[in-house]
Image (cartoon, helix red, strand yellow):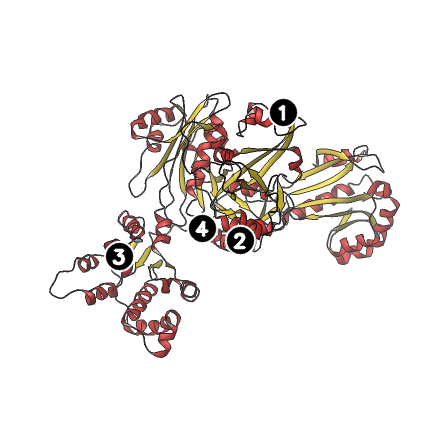
Amino acid sequence: MAKIHKRPAEVNRYCGLVQEQGDAQRDLLGFLPRSAYAEAAAQGKLYVATVDVAGQEYYAGHLLFGGKFPHLRVFQIYTMPQFRGRDIGQKLIEALVSEAEEQYYITISARVAADLPANVFWERMGFVEIRTVSGGVTTGRMINIRRRELNSPTLFSSPKGARAFSLPKHPKPEHPIFALDVNVLLDVLKNRPRGEYAKRLMTASMSGILRLFVAQEFVEELSRAAREQEPDPVLQLAMSLPQFTRVPALFLNSLRGQLAEIVFPSRAISGSLRERDRSDLTHLATMIYHKAAGFVTSDEWILGKRTALRDLYGIEVLGPAELAELYMPSQWTAAQALAESPDGVVIEVSELEEARRQEAESFLKTCSMTDRQAASAVEPGQSACPRHRVVVSVAGEIVGFAAWDASRGPKSSTVAWLGLDPDSSVGELACDVLLDTMFRDSCFARPACVVLNRGRANREAIEYARGQGFKGFTAPDGGTALHKYCLGKILTPASWGAARSELLDLFGFALPTSPPEYSGPDTAIAICMDGTSVQAISLQEFESHFGPAILVIPKRPVVVVPIQRPYADQLLDTAKQRPLFPAPEASVLGEKLYVSTPRALSVLVPGAVILFYESIGSNSGRGAAIAAAQITRTAVKENSEIGIETSRRGVLSSEEVRNMSSRNKVGLTFFNQLFRFECPVELSRLRELGCADGTNFVTARQIEEATGSIIIEEGKGSVRLS
């Protein structure tokens, strides 16, 4: 019976024999330097099979492999002639598969000469032929590239025996209690500019989304400031707010002394604390004693000490704007777009008006929703929790509907509804528009998790949703549902740490501590679930499931391309005003098309980050980088081969496409994950960064990844719809 040795200490004694067979079978195994075998053994990447004959172990074969996580590659596998027929090769492969799955690798590949009988063995081992390539001039052989998908648990796969991937579980908290500072209430009552956020917090509190309490010091502070002999309405209102009980004096005095050294160190040392300082310290001490979720204040001095207070006492200090966006995100301008397909079909995207509510409900019933489900979907929500309802219409008839409630609180999910006309020729377009609107709206304030239960979507909608990054999971009621995370950010090395902390806090899983090095769209992103198991997904899948999202990681290509203002307005929807007439269909699609000369595709490669530079030209262009996206695929086509299905994602006419190249060919670059810059980066700044020269981006130009990161950070990429 064969025995498989994997430990370096066991494998080392057979390295000489392995090397001899490798040298003797160069035509079969390929050439490797002598040092390669010893290095592979030391790294645990050489397995040796032995067979016991009359109590003596004999070398029977070996397997040499390598690769970069999460993809392994077999370089050599060999069985001695006298031991063939004993499944030595199979046992070596099974040992590698078992070890790889335990370490969360997701594929193993092998290169096999197409003319070798060994292809039968690899087929039997589950290695599927994915393509054939030339083996080089010397051999003249064709090489089959074979790959086996492993059953490793990944972020989006189901554990063995489980029906679907489960979301990280968070204990469902009671409505959190936040301590309110006096200045926040005064912001509202005195109608200060930042009072708008405080008003939203008051509305959230009265709607039961969160609870706002005040310390008794809050009332006493206002009492000291109140005028004698005159009723003070501010004081009367303060006295009606929920109050924490008084903190024991011994605890209060001790804690105020500690807090003074953190918040007001110079005045604490000199013994010159003001009355207002002591009042602030009492507020903080009361919050700590009662274990409130956070202290809400407009005081910039206290906000500046938030990190120290969090590290020492585990408390959060927040500004009213920050908390308001967590629990009552600002509502966007209503979704509104008018687009026309190349074949003349006009598509209208709009918020559902109450006058069409009954029409939308009837439409959803034709999408296999029950009366109750349809009625629930079209409800407008409440003033504190309005529901975003969007319809896509063609010739005045609804062909798609989506609705979603904004998440309320840092760990809540966005619940969504989605219905598509199964017989409409623009069903896929409607889904594309509705989901892109939903994702961008949901994650505008912070990353969001969008949940789509099966009862809230018809079959066609669910299939489209899966193609847009939704994955299955086990719902709390035991049923299955779909979910998608929306990051809403462009991550650069500078913002990686903050995004990692945010995702860990919101969703319970962590990105790698530092961004991985780019090695193509399949670059592995290792994610730590629940602080223990590490699961890997590809960069391409990460950006799909977490989109809108772009990861600008080390060595990822970044390319700047020119675009004229009229085309930028239509393709990227960067115009400040809405057009009077229908825009091209591409303006509302998630995946768009940029047309260039075929030469430009040498740098416009799938997986690259693309930055759009709006040329000054004769159209009053801004002369600035205005948006970022990521390239999904590219192609070179004859002008005559470009049909509606291709051109519908771009904004150039057939004549304009033909004029792109004198050789009757054009380069097609498809992109998605569009982020428009809130602060366009002007040409003068691009020159300072060394990525612009005298030509000023007249064609596609690759720049350093670090420079691209700076442009993106300064541009402040946004998921806003317009």
In 3D space, how far apart are the residues under numbered discs 4 and 2 (Cα atoms)?
15 Å
Q: Secondary structure at mark 3?
A: helix
Disc 1 designates what residue? 639
Q: Provide the residue designation for mark 3.
A: 185
Which of the marked residues, 1 or 2, is nearer the chain's N terminus?
2
Q: Residue type at mark 3: give it.
A: Leu
Mark 4 vs 2, N-terminal side: 2
C-alpha gap between disc 2 and disc 3:
36 Å
| Pointer 4 with pointer 3, Cβ within 8 A | no
Label 4 – label 1 distance at C-alpha: 48 Å
Residue 446: x %, y % from top left: 43, 48
| Residue kind at label 1, given as amino acid type | Asn
Which image quadrant is residue 656 in?
A: top right
Residue at point 50%, 20% (across, down): 343
Does residue 122 appear left or right of residue 233 in this picture? right
Quarter assignment of residue 598: top right
